[in-house]
Image (spheres, rainbow, N blue to C red):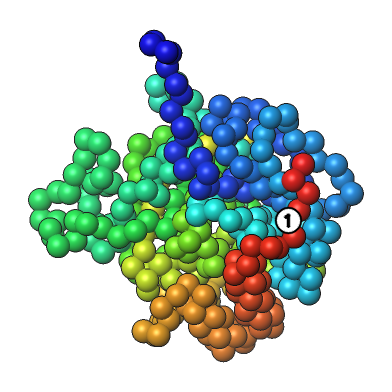
Amino acid sequence: MAGTSVAPTPLLKDELDIVIPTIRNLDFLEMWRPFFQPYHIIIVQDGDPSRVVKVPEGFDYELYNRNDINRILGPKASCISFKDSACRCFGYLVSKKKYIYTIDDDCFVAKDPSGKDINALEQHIKNLLCPATPFFFNTLYDPYRDGADFVRGYPFSLREGAPTAVSHGLWLNIPDYDAPTQLVKPRERNTRYVDAVMTIPKGTLFPMCGMNLAFDRELIGPAMYFGLMGDGQPIGRYDDMWAGWCTKVICDHLGLGVKTGLPYIWHSKASNPFVNLKKEYKGIYWQEELIPFFQSATLTKDCTTVQKCYIELSKQVKAKLGHVDEYFIKLADAMVTWIEAWDELNSTSDIPKGPAK
Ligand SMILES: O=c1ccn([C@@H]2O[C@H](COP(=O)(O)OP(=O)(O)O[C@H]3O[C@@H](CO)[C@H](O)[C@H]3O)[C@@H](O)[C@H]2O)c(=O)[nH]1
Ligand SMILES: [Mn+2]
């Protein structure tokens, strides 16, 4: 009919799942409704499985609690953390979509400097759908962005870029600080909106935060294991860091790009720094050995898939980090279990799904 405008179909509407780990409620979705409603949501309910998580009306979701995880994975459920946001990686396992966006339930819609609501999901999709530049740094940042380009001296042979595997967003208000920093700067808030998306150069690691993160599940999904954290484990709050280090080493090996910068979300809750210190203190000194390990990790030519890379990394973790703490022997085994679970759930389509609603 003339004059009627049809709303455009949201980008990747049927190719992207939103994964949310939660021990809270999901009222935050009300604020995201304009941006999230068209997408399928996978909720990973942590903690007490008998607790009823209310999901606001009108969202298309599936919800998995610990009973579902145990039912679906059986003994392999041992690789999925309990009582830590690391449980979110179960959502990556059961998703059947090409892309994942994961967000915490205390992250809200932020405003850009003009006061406009930021559609974080839309920006992540843009980041994932355009190439990255890991092999040569472009000083005008993202060359594929409207109004930018490659600068003089940038080799033309590299201007095609590399496929983007990861889009790492940032946070206004409560920054993702570690407990010591949080303790010494309790009132510090991030008010700085930096209008940039950058590719993290090949050979450089970065601290990946799972709060506002998107990735191409087909390109890098099997590397996005968030480790053994929380209940029964000597460490917590290093779930996303571990996944980020493994992911970056594998992306570098396979010629994939990792971007960081826009979009911002508004992170509202500062988790308790004393509780955080108890969870993460071992990680603070362990990482002084972990970083050199990842910086020197090499993968051979026959590591041609993410799974093969990841299994090779797990062997190196066991061989080279076992002396740091026996936890890494357990973690290396859990890395293998994760890949077994990944391949089991992603090779057939008849996996029992969690309750849809
Ligand atoms: O035991 C738990 C604790 C939390 N969750 C859910 O996970 C996210 C993040 O929780 P929270 O906002 O309380 O923690 P932060 O310190 O702000 O999180 C950041 O630190 C990292 C720790 O690993 C985390 O990746 C960052 O996002 C919320 O959705 C909680 O509901 C949980 O499932 N289980
Ligand atoms: Mn938080």
Q: Is residue 292 visible?
A: no
**Residue at 54% in and 31% down:** 35
Taking 242 as reference, is 110 above or below it? above
Does residue 15 lie above or below 286 as drawn? above
Residue 196: image x %, image y %? 34, 41
- Residue 221 in the image: x percent, y percent? 52, 63
* Camera-nearest residue between 288 and 215: 215
Q: Residue furthest right?
A: 50
Q: Is residue 52 visible?
A: yes
Within 8 Å of ligand 1, the CB of disc 1?
no
Vertical position of residue 61 compared to residue 118: above or below: below
Residue 75, given in percent of the width and then of the height, sits at 78, 74
* Label 1 packing within 10 angstroms: few (<14), some (14-19), many (20+): some
Q: Nearer the viewer, residue 265 or 98?
A: 98
Q: Nearer the viewer, residue 246 or 344?
A: 344
- Residue drawn 65% across and 58% down? 94
Outermost residue on the top side: it is 3
Q: Residue drawn at (47%, 78%), measured in percent from left and top?
A: 309
User: For this view, does 80 lie left or right of residue 347?
Assistant: right
Q: Which quadrant: the C terminus?
A: top right
Question: Looking at the image, which residue is at 49% across and 79% down?
Answer: 308
Q: Position of residue 289 (x, y in %)?
A: 53, 76
Say which of 188 and 154 sits in front. Answer: 154
Q: Is residue 292 left or right of residue 204?
A: right
Which quadrant of the structure image shows residue 270?
A: top right
Dot 1: element: loop
In the rendered image, which quarter is residue 122 located in?
top left
The amino acid at mark 1 is: Lys
Work out which residue is located at the far bottom of the displayed protein and give it. 319
Q: Which residue is mark 1?
A: 353
The quadrant of the image that shows the N terminus is top left
